[in-house]
Image (cartoon, rainbow, N blue to C red):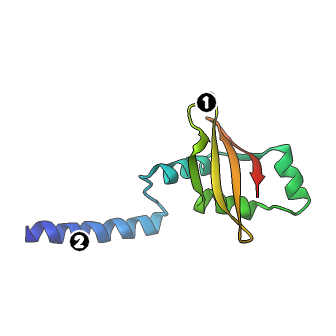
Amino acid sequence: MVGFSIGLIFLGIFLKKKSDETGVSFCYLPNCRTLKDIRSKPLSYSDEINQLIANKELDSTIINSFLFDGDVDFRKSETKSKPCKTYSIEGEVNQKEAVLTVRNCASKAVVEQIEY
């Protein structure tokens, strides 16, 4: 039992160091896996989002904060739709709650709209 415990400690240290060096993250929960899948694809914007970016009401750093720190609301999301799934991602913009809608297709992700 003592050897097993020491082995677990060394394994934990080794995996932590390995993930820090390579930037690998382990996503086991559905929220993390969904956001990681969206981030791994080319991202494009709808006309509505492009207009908000052009008017400087929104920028890519805000969208990235949703994709890294947001919470996917699976109740409002359409996870069974074909060919693209639509996700509602809740986050915060300028200390106000907002919801970003993203359509996640096989080859790309499209940011559809943002609601405050």
Q: Position of residue 91 (x, y in %)?
A: 65, 61
Q: Are marks 2 and 1 in contact (CB under 8 Å)?
A: no
Q: Nearer the viewer, mark 2 or mark 1?
A: 1
Horizontally, residue 33 falls left or right of residue 40, namely left
Query: At label 2, which amino acid type do we have?
Result: Ile
Q: Position of residue 112 (x, y in %)?
A: 75, 44
Q: Position of residue 20 (x, y in %)?
A: 45, 69
Horizontally, residue 22 falls left or right of residue 59, namely left
Q: Quadrant of residue 82?
A: top right
Helix, strand or loop for disc 2? helix
Residue at figure coordinates x 47%, y 63% from the top left: 22
Marker disc for residue 105: none
Q: Residues within 10 Å of mark 2 (few under 14, many from 20)?
A: few
Q: What is the quadrant of the N terminus in the image? A: bottom left
Give the residue number, with chain letter if any, for mark 1: 81
Sequence-wise, which precedes: disc 2 or disc 1?
2
Give the residue number, with chain letter if any, for mark 2: 9
State how many labels appear: 2
Q: Residues within 10 Å of mark 1 (few under 14, many from 20)?
A: few
Query: At label 1, which amino acid type do we have?
Result: Ser
Helix, strand or loop for disc 1? loop
- The single residue placed furthest to the right in the displayed view is 55
Q: Report how far apart the C-alphas of labels 2 and 1 lie in the structure.
A: 43 Å
| Up-down relation of residue 5 to residue 86 (above or below) | below
Q: Position of residue 33 (x, y in %)?
A: 50, 49
- The single residue placed furthest to the top in the displayed view is 82
